[in-house]
Amino acid sequence: MRWWSVANLVSNAGTWMQLTVQNLLVLQVTGSAAMTGLSLAVQAGPGLLLGLLGGAAVDRWPRKRTAALSQAGLGLVALVTAGLVAFGALSVPALLILAAVTGVIATVDAPATALLGNDLVPTRDVPSAIALGSAVHSVGRLAGTALAGVAMVAFGPAAAFAANGLSFAFVSSVIPFLKLIDKSGEQGAAPVPAAKPEGFDGTAREGLRFFMRRPRLVALAAITGLGAVFGRNYALTLAVLVTGPLAAGAGAFGTVSTALAVGGIAGALLAGVLQRPSVRMVAAMAGIGAVLQIAAGLTPTLALLIALVIPMAVVESVSDTAGTTVLQTDPPPHMRGRVLGVWRSLSTGWGLIGPPAIGLLMELVGARAALVIGGLVIATAAGAGLLVHSRRTAPAAAPAVSLTKAPAPLAAAA
């Protein structure tokens, strides 16, 4: 797990180096902001359309081999891009093709690497492993963003793509040496079937059916989707708030972004102590975050906003860790790749819808009102969900004890 964490830190730093310069490079190559947006959509599109198929592939193929090959594929694309940039041969068609290929590979890579990390620790430590991964991601983001500026000045934009390609190669070379833990003998662990379970056909459609018939996964998707559309577009909403109503500059927004990153790291470390994450915890965190968002929308000063965004990021990070743990541990092992595939399609969808939706809302009512309205929507949904859950579980909390009839089995109550 330590080797895997180091590899992921290197990979995340490389990815954020590339992302930091990528949009600027696309804008320089095309001269069009619309084309820049199109390149991002082309890269995200496969996640929306092929997420289910990618998850099904992860369930069918050996985990380590799949992750190693997908990482190598992403590294190859990054190195090809670096070569085209270095020789001034990156055209618009080539740019779009490379973006699409990256998106296709990522539909397999994302669930494969996520589940591989969980296979390195006992089941009881999975929440801590996910929290560690979140902290590694946040630290890699800070390091990669800083290194991108150095690389741009010293070596040019091609260096960022080359560094990202080498970081993927490093991860791919580490994977074969990782030792997976056999969890079949753990207390409470689901037995590993020797053959396909009854009704198991290994298709993407089966994964979608499983997801839609699992109320807690549907509830998790609903609250997370609302949060993604109305509450988590801080790069947009807080940028407009800082430079508009608060009358501060780009440097001030940089400070706010740093505060968000610090809060994200702190939240990831705090989430490491979670033992039994649940959808109810995600809803509670969403409600708390919504209240903080409303306060941020009403804040009169930049200093108070900075003080608010740190706990906002902490709550978001804890919520993400809890939700990810539910996604990766609630389904039976033979369904987890496809559940993550469904989630990738959903998250890509609301990731594409969120920024234009909240942007339109800000155009109509302003940044402050948009933050307040978004927070009210999330808080209302989270509160309603928690209320419904408490009413459903209240009768089962204190069942009547009969002297002539044995109590229901614990499994039935669960």
Image: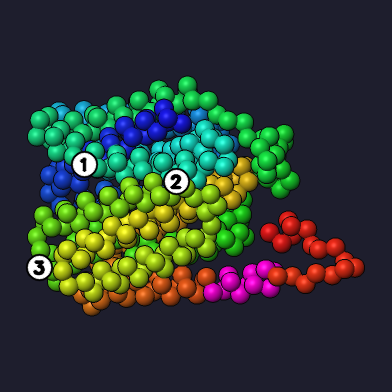
Q: Quadrant of residue 316?
A: bottom left
Distance from Cα at disc 2 to Cα at disc 3: 38 Å
Q: Position of residue 211 (x, y in %)?
A: 57, 56
Q: Residue at x 70, y 39 (%)?
A: 191
Asked whether the residues under the numbered discs 3 and 1 touch, taking CB atoms below 8 Å apart as contact, a structural biologist would say: no
Kind of residue at badge 3: Ala
**Residue at label 1?**
145
Q: Earlier in the sequence, mark 2 or mark 3?
A: 3
Asked whether the residues under the numbered discs 2 and 3 touch, taking CB atoms below 8 Å apart as contact, a structural biologist would say: no
**Dot 3 crowding, Cα within 10 Å, few <14, some 14–19, many 20+:** few
User: Is residue 53 visible in this depiction of the protein?
Assistant: no
Q: Is residue 378 left or right of residue 20?
A: right
Q: Which mark is residue 272?
A: 2
Q: Earlier in the sequence, mark 1 or mark 2?
A: 1
Asked whether the residues under the numbered discs 1 and 2 touch, taking CB atoms below 8 Å apart as contact, a structural biologist would say: no
Kind of residue at badge 2: Gly
User: Is residue 306 visible in this depiction of the protein?
Assistant: yes
Q: How many marks?
A: 3
Q: Front-most of 79 and 330? A: 330
Asked if residue 213 is positioned above or below residue 136 in the image, the reply reads below
Q: Secondary structure at mark 1?
A: helix
**Residue at label 3?**
247
Q: Quadrant of residue 80?
A: top left
Range drawn in magenta: 387-397
**Dot 1 crowding, Cα within 10 Å, few <14, some 14–19, many 20+:** some
Q: Position of residue 370 (x, y in %)?
A: 27, 73
